[in-house]
Amino acid sequence: ATEKPGSVQQAEDSAFTEFEESLLSMENLDRSSPELWPEKIPGMNEIMSIFTPPNSNKLPYSKELTQEDQNYLHQLASLSTSGLITKVKDLHDMAYQLGLEESKEMTRG
């Protein structure tokens, strides 16, 4: 298509250019980032560090395994695939039953 003054193509191009210019932002983003987790009460972190035991930040799975734990792991490792699946299903059923019992107790309470 030839571009003649006043043609449909030229009108569409100018409308698109105007739309594109309207989306242009002149905002300046060179400011520093805000603090994400400001302290609600100044000095509270220091007070909490005094009262918190130093070993309390250990993860529950980072403790040493007992001999009983190691024996249980070896027992699970020696299971076949189907035996392991059966064990997982049994654990799932036990967890479901515990959930039902807990729900009953909470309703009763």
Image: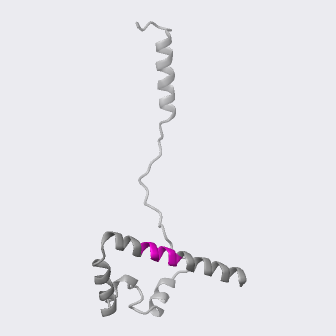
Horizontally, is 43 left or right of 103 in the view? left
Horizontally, is 94 left or right of 67 in the view? right
Q: Name the one closer to the observer, 100 or 59.
A: 100
- The verdict on residue 91 being magenta is yes
Q: Is residue 12 above or below residue 67?
A: above
Give me the residue at 47% from left, 8% from top. 5
Q: Name the one closer to the observer, 84 or 54.
A: 84
Give me the residue at 27% from left, 78% from top. 78
Q: Name the one closer to the observer, 54 or 20.
A: 54
Give me the residue at 35% from left, 73% from top. 83
Res. 39 in view: no
Locate residue 85, reporting x and y percent: 38, 70
Count of numbered marks: 0
Q: Name the one closer to the observer, 45 or 58.
A: 58
Locate residue 24, reporting x and y percent: 47, 36
- The verdict on residue 32 being magenta is no
> Quarter of the image containing the N terminus?
top left
Locate residue 57, reporting x and y percent: 40, 85
Q: Is residue 32 above or below residue 27?
A: below
Locate residue 16, reporting x and y percent: 48, 24
Give me the residue at 44% from left, 61% from top. 33
Q: Is residue 54 above or below residue 18?
A: below
Its colouring scheme is one colour
Horizontally, is 21 left or right of 85 in the view? right
Secondary structure mostly seen in the magenta stretch: helix
> Quarter of the image containing the C terminus?
bottom right
Q: Which residues are magenta?
A: 88-95
